[in-house]
């Protein structure tokens, strides 16, 4: 019978009977609100989010694994989404509102025809062109390097956070849950 979080999760995955059901929530939004920080802070400051999560777990009890989907990933989401998401605290959006992607078409029939005629390898060029339009800082090499450097630093902080949770016995279960608005087929 599983006695620690990792064994409990592995037992459940292996279709064996753990001592209890493993708890691995996607907890970013809940823990930030419960822990007293804004959604903006959750997106852009992993350290503040960790403190909020720690407080949440202290109040509500332990979990077996954690899965961050958006904590600390605000800059990445802004720079890599062809239709920029409405991130809290950015561009006039309230710092503690509801996060959502904007559902809008990013390519019309003419774009599909162009890619269809040019071949699928044309798609990455179109995609990066779309990013440059929505994110002017990506239009020149200096802006691109600065933006990617910031994103790399965010990923490094997220990785350190993962290691910290693992040391506490909390499994870091899944990679990031990154999605972009679908292309309309």
Image (cartoon, grey):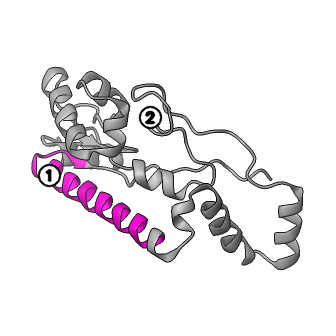
Task: Determine whether the residue tagged by mark 1 lies in a helix, strand or loop.
Answer: helix
The magenta region covers: 144-171
Kindly identify the residue that appears in the image at 26 percent across and 62 percent down. 156
**Residue that badge 1 annotates:** 164
- Residue 48 is left or right of residue 119, and the answer is left
- Can residue 9 be seen here? The reply is yes
- Residue 35 is left or right of residue 69, and the answer is left
Distance between the Cα atoms at labels 1 and 2?
26 Å
Dominant secondary structure, magenta: helix
**Residue that badge 2 annotates:** 88
State yes or no: residue 81 in magenta: no
- Residue 83 is left or right of residue 148, and the answer is right
State yes or no: residue 152 in magenta: yes
Percent position (x, y) of residue 129? 67, 67
Are there few (<14), some (14-19), or many (20+) residues within 10 Å of tag 2? many
- Disc on the earlier residue, 1 or 2: 2
* Callouts 1 and 2 close, C-beta under 8 Å: no
Viewer-closest of 143 and 68: 143
> In this rendering, which labeled residue sits more in front, label 1 or label 2?
2
Viewer-closest of 32 and 148: 148
Q: Quadrant of the N terminus?
A: top left
Kindly identify the residue that appears in the image at 16 percent across and 52 percent down. 166
Kindly identify the residue that appears in the image at 32 percent across and 38 percent down. 42
Query: Vertical placement of 56 versus 18: above or below?
Result: above
Residue 3 got which mark?
Answer: none
Percent position (x, y) of residue 121? 72, 78
- Can residue 25 be seen here? The reply is no
- Residue 164 is left or right of residue 91, and the answer is left
Kindly identify the residue that appears in the image at 50 percent across and 39 percent down. 91
Task: Determine whether the residue tagged by mark 2 lies in a helix, strand or loop.
Answer: loop
């Amino acid at each position: 019978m599983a006695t620690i979080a990792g064994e409990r999760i592995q037992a459940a995955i292996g279709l064996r009977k753990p001592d209890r059901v493993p708890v691995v929530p996607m907890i970013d939004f809940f823990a930030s609100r419960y822990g007293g920080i804004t959604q903006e802070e959750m997106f852009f400051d992993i350290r503040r989010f960790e403190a909020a999560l720690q407080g949440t777990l202290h109040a509500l009890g332990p979990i077996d694994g954690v899965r961050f989907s958006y904590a600390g990933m605000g800059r990445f989401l802004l720079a890599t989404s062809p239709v920029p998401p409405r991130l809290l605290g950015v561009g006039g959006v309230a710092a503690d509102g509801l996060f959502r992607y904007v559902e809008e078409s990013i390519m019309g029939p003419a774009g599909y025809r162009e890619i269809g005629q040019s071949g699928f390898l044309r798609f990455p060029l179109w995609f990066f062109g779309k990013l440059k339009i929505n994110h002017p800082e990506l239009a020149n090499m200096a802006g691109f390097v600065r933006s990617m450097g910031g994103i790399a630093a965010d990923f490094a902080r997220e990785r350190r956070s993962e290691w910290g949770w693992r040391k506490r016995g909390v499994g870091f279960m899944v990679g990031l849950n990154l999605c972009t608005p679908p292309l309309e087929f």
